[in-house]
Amino acid sequence: MSLHRQGRHYLLIGGVQWLLDWGVMVLLSHFGLLIEAANICGRISGAMLGFWLNGKFTFAGNDTRIGGTQLRRFVLMWLCTTAVSTLAMGHIDDVFGLQWAWLAKPAVELMLGVVGFLLSRHWVYKA
């Protein structure tokens, strides 16, 4: 499976995931939920969609599968990236305010997306 094809699918699916994640975070924090909790809720919503779509389309191949092992690897990766994202959102909110956290989320998630792509391609979905 080509890196170009995987990258294209990962970006497309990641864009949909990010819109869902960001929208949930903004909506919940707008209604008063702490930014850290709202960020975790947003990331959960995006992750549920992304695990299946990326496993089924982006990284699908003879040497990959979607099963319990892959789910455990995905959850471990997700927990680590969510911790980094949530700490970053909380810090940005504390220092610069809520609106800056909303604006910074895309940059934070883009950096974590690169890490997620590499881990998914070489570890998460491997059989």
Image (tube, helix red, strand yellow):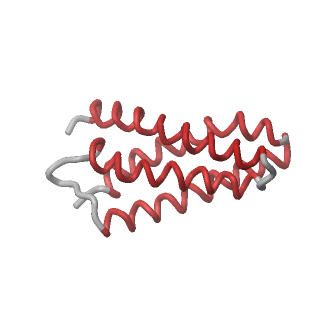
The quadrant of the picture occupied by the N terminus is top left
Q: Quadrant of residue 108?
A: top right
Please tell me which residue is depicted at 62% across the width and 35% down the height of the picture: 107
Looking at the picture, tell me which residue is in the foreground, 67 or 83.
67
Q: Is residue 60 left or right of residue 87?
A: left
Image coordinates of residue 37 in percent, x first then y, are 70, 58
Q: Residue furthest front?
A: 31
Q: How many marks?
A: 0
Image coordinates of residue 35 in percent, x first then y, are 75, 51
Q: Is residue 43 left or right of residue 104?
A: left
Q: Quadrant of residue 75?
A: bottom left
Q: Is residue 47 left or right of residue 99?
A: left
Residue 100 vs 125, above or below: the answer is above
Image coordinates of residue 77 in percent, x first then y, are 47, 59
Please tell me which residue is depicted at 34% across the width and 57% down the height of the picture: 124
Q: Residue furthest left?
A: 62
Image coordinates of residue 79 in percent, x first then y, are 54, 62
Looking at the picture, tell me which residue is in the foreground, 18 or 7.
18
The quadrant of the picture occupied by the C terminus is bottom left
Please tell me which residue is depicted at 27% across the width and 43% down the height of the picture: 57
